Image (cartoon, rainbow, N blue to C red):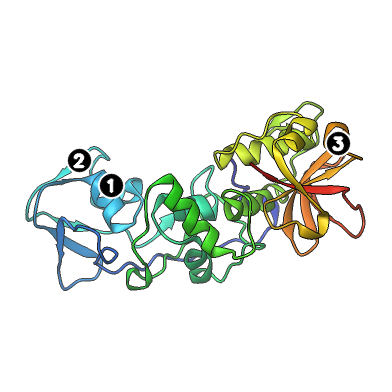
Amino acid sequence: MKIVSNKNTGSKTLKGLTIVLGATASAGVANATTNTAHASTIKAKDAISLKDLAKEKHVDVTDLAKENKVSEDHTVEKDDKIKLPTKYTVKQGDTVSEVAQRLDIKTQKLLDANNMTWTNATIHVGDKLKLPSTKDNKQVQTTQTQTQNVQAQQTTTAQAPNSSSIVQNAIQLAHENIPYVWGGTSLSGFDCSGLVQYLESQAGVNVGRTTYEQAGNCQIKSVSEAQPGDLLFWGSSASSAYHVAIYIGNGQYVHAPQPGQNVTIGSIASFAPSFAGTPR
């Protein structure tokens, strides 16, 4: 995802939220630090790069560097005392799911910590996200396949690859006033298939550029069988599909409708698709 809305959009913000971090890393992770009495300060028992320390402690390396007034390439020496940042500052391009994945935190826990849901997770540049306590975090597996498994656990009905992040990113874009642009494939404007291509590519899925290519790269199913993250198509068959959207659940989808309209959330009840598909 490459966009976060401006604070002047009128959307709800998370201003004033702070991160509260304990001093320990998740269970099972090999630590290069030991804890001091102060919850946000640690003492290094071995030399470690700031980037590795940030990953170990589930914090952002930029925030960690600023907190300690060092560069991101800094090496922490043995017995150095390091302050952990007490907040995560939302940056351009952030979404909740991407922040969670980057910090090795379960997305659902990050949502819960900020009283947010998958369908209400809009964040803005400069917002302060509260992180869940480290004692609540499980060790997060780091291979691509393992990451997908973690995301699948967060929504038991999802079938599409990385469906949780796709749905959340789609909802985010639906609140950004992005116009329909014929042939558009960027945040300055999308057509229907360009939007789907963009969202899927952000999750590492290649579904093709055109609507019929995307239908051809899906396992076709009925609309009634659609799960969040699946694609919805309009047309009599995959080869004649003329419109496509991302299904987000509860009878709703995100799509780029037509010239003169913005990327928005639509309803199956008001504009019903012909069939659905799960990207292969």
**In the depicted structure, whether residue 258 falls above or below residue 63:** above
Q: Could you tell me which residue is drawn at 71 percent across and 41 percent down?
A: 218
**Circle 3 or circle 1, nearest the eye:** 3
- In-front residue for pair 213/24: 213
Q: Are marks 1 and 2 in contact (CB under 8 Å)?
A: yes
Is residue 132 shown left or right of residue 258?
Answer: left
Q: Residues within 10 Å of mark 3 (few under 14, many from 20)?
A: many
Q: Which quadrant: the N terminus?
A: top right
- In three-dimensional space, the C-alpha distance between marks 2 and 3, rounded to whole angstroms, equals 53 Å
Task: Kindly give the residue lying farthest to the top in the view shown.
Answer: 183
* Contact? badges 2 and 3 (CB < 8 Å): no
Residue 69 appearing in the image = no
Residue under label 1: 65
Residue 82 point in image, percent of width and height: 19, 56
Q: Amino acid at mark 2?
A: His
Amino acid at the residue labelled 3:
Ala
Q: Nearer the viewer, residue 168 or 120?
A: 168
Q: Residues within 10 Å of mark 1 (few under 14, many from 20)?
A: many
Q: Which mark is residue 74?
A: 2
**Residue position marked by numbered label 3 in the rendering:** 241
Q: Answer above or below: position of 130 versus 214.
A: below
Asked which secondary structure carries label 1, the reply is: helix
Lower position in the chain sequence, tag 3 or tag 1: 1
Mark 2 or 3, closer to the camera? 3
Residue 194's quadrant in the figure?
top right
